[in-house]
Amino acid sequence: MNTAILIPARYNSSRFPGKPLQILGSKTMVETVAEKCSESGLPVYILTDDTRIVENVDKTYNVIYDEAPYDNGTERCMGALSNPMLDKYDFFINVQGDMPDISSEIINSVYKKMISDYRIVTAYTDIKNEAQKNDTNSVKIIVTKNNVRWFGRGFKYGYHHLGIYGYSRHNLEVYGKRQTEYENLEQLEQLRWFERGVEISAVKVDFDGVEINTPEDIKKWNAKNNK
């Protein structure tokens, strides 16, 4: 399958400005994510709206610069489809730029599920503790028979949703640029697909990493990795 990994990297995040260029160990966060993604063997593209990210990313990585405003990372991926660099790909795996502990095993699990049923696929794992249940930055997911029923922040049950999606070019194109009621309710971009009538499959994976939502998470990651 002609598949590429896309990593949206917006500089002016409302919750954590400059997050992609925060240092994890000896590399920027976006480079750390790109390095992990490269271990899957799939080509990797960093999508950004800021020249500071272009200038500070190792030149061995493919970077697509687009200064157009987008509401979220999925819209940025959709916008990147017009770039000739992506013409040869029919499928994409969107990895959030704040997942430095993404693994090739997780990526390959999403990839295999995607090419087996051609639907949008995302990943989830067990909720690890009470703190995660109560953390609104930790997105929850309700799954029944490998089908996603809902994503949310406020409830304390279900599973922990991981920020990775696999989809075809077609399903990315139908995402559109109009925000929806569900999306605005939970402040979660993936809910836009539900109001487009698009189903989402899910695959369970093992994950014991740190997702970077706040400056405090940078400290947690560095401490865990002894950096």
Image (spheres, rainbow, N blue to C red):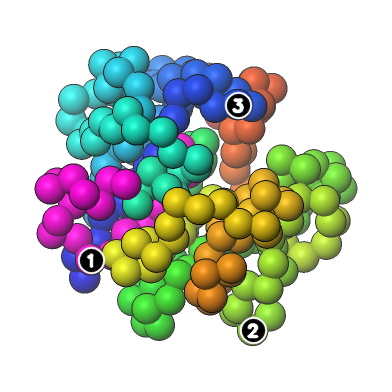
Name the residue located 72 percent from the left edge and 51 percent from the top edge.
186
Q: Which residue is mark 2?
A: 145
Give the amino acid type for the residue marked by disc 2 in the picture: Lys
Name the residue located 60 percent from the left edge and 38 percent from the top edge.
211
Residue 226 position in % (x across, y down): 57, 23
Q: Which range is magenta?
A: 79-97
Q: Earlier in the sequence, mark 3 or mark 1?
A: 3
Name the residue located 83 percent from the left edge and 62 percent from the top edge.
157
Q: Earlier in the sequence, mark 3 or mark 2?
A: 3
Q: Which residue is mark 3?
A: 14
Q: How many marks?
A: 3
Kindly report which numbered mark, 2 or 1, lies closer to the viewer in this rendering.
1
Q: Which residue is mark 1?
A: 90
In screen coordinates, is 141 left or right of 17?
Answer: right
Position above or below: 157 against 162? below
Residue 89 drawn in magenta: yes
Give the amino acid type for the residue marked by disc 1 in the picture: Asp
The one nearer the camera, 186 or 136, is 186
CA gap, disc 3 and disc 2: 35 Å
Residue 184 drawn in magenta: no
